[in-house]
Image (cartoon, helix red, strand yellow):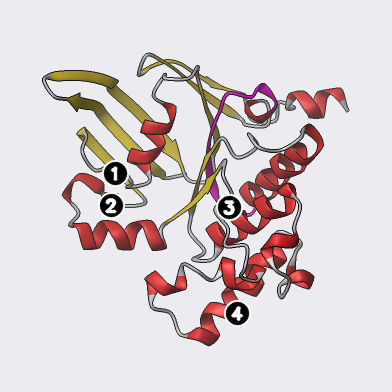
Amino acid sequence: MSPIIELRAVSKHYRSGRVSTQVLHEVDLTIDEGELVAIVGTSGSGKSTLLNIIGGLDGAFEGRAVVAGEDLGKLSDRALSAFRNERVGFIFQQFNLLEHLSLAENVALPASFARRAERDAEQRALRALERVGLADRAGDLAANLSGGQKQRVAIARALWSEPPLLLCDEPTGNLDSDTGHQIIEMFGELNASGITLIVVTHEERVSRAARRVVRLEDGRVIADEREPDGAPKDDEAAA
């Protein structure tokens, strides 16, 4: 497999007046196409900052970040916006749905940035909802959904542009254990279809579903753990 993410000596500082705080320290990380990787660590370890850099949400960093073939530090604002809209799907702890809109309308919201034709946007939205098992509710209002269903819609929205990479920041944080398990299973299915997933989490149940776990502490990678090919995941072994 070819690398889809290559980070070299990536560092990040935040400044407040004369005070500078370093939150990432020369991170080197390579992730191949088709991997499902969990990034774990305590609060303040730099997990979300690292994910924001990978996703092109934070361009003020040191070092080099090549993601999906794009050298992010060299992109113009316009090119970086196109990268975020077309090459990466984002899933957050908060669902960020517009509750007065239908499921299909929520999923198709990225079309307003991508300037897609209305018919194409609707077809893409229906395909994405089908992937998360909600195509039959495409016309329902988002306000009428459970938390787990709202997260499924958020996943469908992330899939709308058919990106090769999904970036997930604490995606099960607002869900009960059973619903969270369903979302984790869905991530496994999406990964099996060829999508690369990077999941930031502090929950062991999420990291156990990954074949690779990258551990951060104080902005540094302190461990990069991989399961050998063919080894059962914890939940598979317990079955």
Residue highlighted by disc 3:
194
Q: Secondary structure at mark 2?
A: strand
Judge from the rendering whether residue 12 lies leftward or rightward of residue 67; answer left or right.
left
Marker disc for residue 123: 4
Mark 3 and mark 2 in contact? Answer it, CB < 8 Å: no
Tell me which label, 3 or 2, sits earlier in the chain: 2
- Seen from this angle, which residue lies furthest left? 18
Q: Secondary structure at mark 4?
A: helix
Q: Toward the viewer: 170 or 83?
A: 170
* Amino acid beneath label 2: Glu
Residue drawn at point x = 66 percent, y = 50 percent: 151
Residue 82 higher or lower than 112, as above or below: above
Residue drawn at point x = 42 percent, y = 19 percent: 45
Residue 178 higher or lower than 195, as above or below: above
Q: Secondary structure at mark 1?
A: strand
Is residue 5 a member of the stretch shown in magenta?
A: no
Tell me which label, 3 or 4, sits earlier in the chain: 4
Residue highlighted by disc 1:
66
* Amino acid beneath label 1: Val
Marker disc for residue 70: 2
Residue drawn at point x = 50 percent, y = 69 percent: 109
Q: Residue 155: horizontal and vertical position, in percent?
A: 61, 54
Mark 1 and mark 2 in contact? Answer it, CB < 8 Å: yes
Residue drawn at point x = 60 percent, y = 79 percent: 123
Q: In front: mark 3 or mark 2?
A: 2
Tell me which label, 2 or 4, sits earlier in the chain: 2
Q: CA distance from mark 2 to mark 4?
A: 28 Å
Tell me which label, 1 or 3, sits earlier in the chain: 1
Q: CA distance from mark 1 to mark 2?
A: 5 Å
Q: Which residues are magenta?
A: 193-205
Image quarter of the C terminus: top right
Badge 4 density bin: few <14, some 14–19, many ≥20, Cα 10 Å: some
